[in-house]
Every structure is written in C-alpha cells, then in structure tokens.
Amino acid sequence: MISRFGIIDISPATFFGGEFIGAKAVVNEAVAISATIIREGHEGFDAFAVLVDESGKIASREKMVEIWPNSQRFEAFLRPKALGNWSFYIEVSAENPGEFAKTLMTKSESYPIKVERERALIGNWYEFFPRSEGAKKNSDGSISSGNFRSAAERIEDVAKMGFDVLYLPPIHPIGYSHRKGRNNSLTAGPLDPGVPWAIGNESGGHDAINPELGSLDDFKYFLKVAKKNNVEVALDLALQCSPDHPWVKTNPEWFTKRADGSIAYAENPPKKYQDIYPLNFDNDYPGLFAEIYRVVTLWIELGINIFRVDNPHTKPINFWADFIAKINQKYPQVVFLAEAFTTPAMMHALGKAGFQQSYTYFTWRVTKSELEEYAKEVAYQTSAFFRPNFWVNTPDILPFHLQSGNPAAFALRAVLASTLSPSWGMYAGYELYEHIPIGEGKEEYRDSEKYEIKVRDWQAAAKKSLTLRHLSPS
C-alpha cells in the first residue's frame, strides 16, 4: 500500500511460503537496508531505517542516504547485537510548513531478520575420513583402519592450516547388503570397508557409532581434542539407510516399495546406489519427523552444532522448513549446510527453508567472467536467503581444472575459494595434489576414498600445505 510517501522495493525482503521470511544475518553484521523513496514535487524528506530486537524494543535508528544523486534509492546499515528474530522498518518524514503546519510521516511494514551466530556465515572447512587418518598398510598388503583416536592426532595439523571446521562423513555403522567395492564396484571383497553413506547394520543406525572407528568415549575424546584446537566438528546428516538398517525392520513404512514388494534403492541421476534405501516422507510424516529429531538432538547434546546435510534436495522442502525451525528454536547455535548440487531454484528454496549455508556452483566457474558473475550473484542478488560455501573439491568431485596435477592450479582455486566466499572448504588429499580421475571425461577420483581406506604421507604434505586465510574472512 502506498502512503503519503512512497516506500517501495524494500530490501532485504524475501517472500516464501506465503509470508516474508527472515533475511539472513549474523551477530554484529552490517545489514544493508535499502528502498526506493519518492514524494511529489521538489520538497525534501528524512528517511530512517529502524532496527527492532526480539522483544520489540527499538535497538537503533540510522539515517538513510541516497546511494547516488537522483536515484531515489536510499540505504542505511543496521547491526543486530544478539541472536534471535529481529525486524526492521523504514520511516520517512517531512515538515509541512504554512498555516496548517504539521509533520508528514510514513512508516513501512516490518520485515524480519534472522540473526544467527558467526559460524552460519564464516568458516574454513576441512573434510577427512576418520578411518583413513592413522591407517597403516600391513606387510601382507591389507590395511589397518584408522579410528577416532588416531584421527584426533591430525586435528592440530588441520588447525595449523587455518581450518576451524572439521567435517566428517557419516560415522555410523555401515551396511553389508550390496556393499560397494573399490571404485564403486558392485562386488565387494571381504576387506572392503563399505561406503559410509550406506548407514546401518546390526550395530545400529543413525544414532550409533561405527565400532570400527571406536567407542562413544573415543568419539568424545575426538571432540575434546578438536575443542582444544578451536576446531568445530561437523557431522554428516544423511537421511538414508542401508538395507541392514534397524529402521527397515522396525518401520518399513518409512521406505518406498515397488510393485513387487521390494524396497526401492536410491538414485541421483545418473548415479545409482543399490546399497542405499531412501526415506519416504509421505507414509508416516509425524513418526519419521520425530525419529530424525531424536537422532539429531542426540548428537547436539553430545556437542555437535554443525551438520552437513547430504542431498537435501531429494527430501520434501516442507520437511526442512519444519525441521530446521524446530531445531533452531531450541538450539539456535546449530548450523545446517546443504550439500545440494541441483537447480538454482531448489538451492535457493532450501536456503529460504532455513539452511544456513549451501554448496555452490563455484566448482564449475572457471573463467574470469564466470567467477566475477557468480561472485556478484552470491554477494548481492541472493545474499538475503542464500549463504555460499565454496568447496575446491569433494570426495564426489575432482574438477577438470585440477586433473593436470599442476600445483599452481590447486593454489589458485584455494585462494579464489577462500577470498570470494566467507565460507570455503577443502577435502583431504588436496594438499597432496591428488588428481587422477577414474576415467577420461569423468569428474570422480580413481580409487575414491568413499569405497576404500586411504593411507597418505602427511609428512610430505606438510612441506606443501596451503595455509590460507584465517584472520581475514571475506
């Protein structure tokens, strides 16, 4: 509705699900508030951006200035000082002189701001598989797995490289049925450790720890060492099961059945995952929701405050909106990273549904023009609802531009990722310039760590390590 003064095209203002949702911000972040403001004639006016805290009290009132002459676009910066659901509005006033002197006033509607902790915006992420850290090759050619105790010994080195978030692939028991072998072979050998994302066996499911990695006490020790080194541990939240997961027996209604009565395995075209059953959210939404909530809060109570969510775009968007809202209501410190390499519309919708961060298309932006265009997009066009996390590589993705093994290419991409985005990530092995693809024209690693335990020479890596920004976030 247009009042005495026109206040239009207000930003940030994101409409989603039938309402305006909170613009993303972190504590003490300068949030740019802007609007086009018009009035008749040549008379002036004063415009203010007003910040309101969660209790409804005015926290600050900043004068808006015209961004450039005659643009009629005005801007001010507001800094929320605490976590919570804040809001802002714009107020425009002018004196009306003469016989009937009075102050003319227009106040816009209020728009929400969701204020979160700094980690929701800024972080230096590192990913490793605990089973590979401290792994040893035996004289008979077999490999002894690493575990939480041996992996804890690497945390100090991770911190020294400047990383402050350590992301672990799933740490839960791994299924045996249709277990994948090396290089995604459909036939696993007796010593193949399985894919961590095929969650669940007789030892438990999403609420259990893989016994091959150690005990709950070993995991607590791992967290203690990480905390000592000022590193936060992020867990993988992969809402899927192996055929051996306890849920398959206790709650078969949580899965999709084919016409022949068998359970459908997961597909993410062109990839097929015969060792994984996806969840079906349409048969028992309340029951499945409650169980996932129980599992996630269990890990939160153990000290996990960051979750990297595997393929969230393959789950209903309303689930994420409901789930993240409920988690953040009780645990506002918890951060969810969406691992969603999908369409822009879905990636943006996940951000609007509550995900604090998302993987991005940075991996496939290579030329100067591509990088400039994409950096501007995530910095300006989508920043109110989509926070980027630029990864230089992942266990799934070995970009073509790294397949030469040229150290300069590795250094360049790491510098670009760590300076173009406030959050960025690196998967272990990058420091060693690992670069051999599984085949020509493929963006996957040969001898991928998803299917086997890696034994690496970190002493050699120490001589080449990429120690990048830590005190100078983007």
Image (cartoon, rainbow, N blue to C red):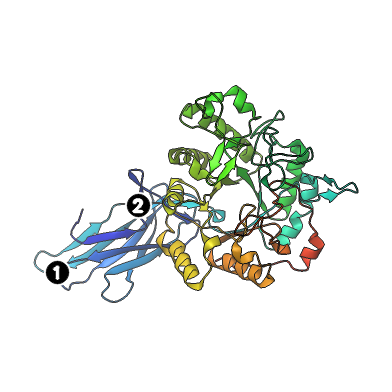
Q: Which mark is residue 111?
A: 2
Q: Is residue 26 visible?
A: yes
Of marks 1 and 2, the one in the foreground: 2
Give me the disc on residue 197.
Answer: none
Q: Write the residue at 65% across / 64% down.
A: 403
- Going by the numbered disc 2, the residue's amino acid type is Tyr
Label 2: how many Cα within 10 Å (few below 14, some 14–19, many 20+): many
The residue beneath circle 1 is 97
Residue 125 at x, y percent in the picture: 63, 57
| Front position in the image: 359 or 19 | 359
Give the answer, above or below, for where 4 lies relative to 134.
Answer: below
The image shows residue 35 at horizontal and vertical percentages of: 30, 63
Q: Give residue 407's position: percent from left, percent from top.
A: 69, 70
Under circle 2, the secondary element is strand
Whole-angstrom CA distance, mark 1 to mark 2, is 32 Å
Is any atom of residue 471 visible in this view? no
Lateral position of residue 131 relative to residue 243, left or right: right
Question: Which residue occupies the foreground of this view, 378 or 457?
Answer: 457
Q: Residue at x 65, y 36 (%)?
A: 199
Left/right placement of residue 193 relative to residue 318 reads right
Q: In the rendered image, which quarter is residue 32 located in?
A: bottom left
Circle 1/circle 2 CB separation < 8 Å? no
Q: Does label 1 or label 2 sit earlier along the sequence?
A: 1
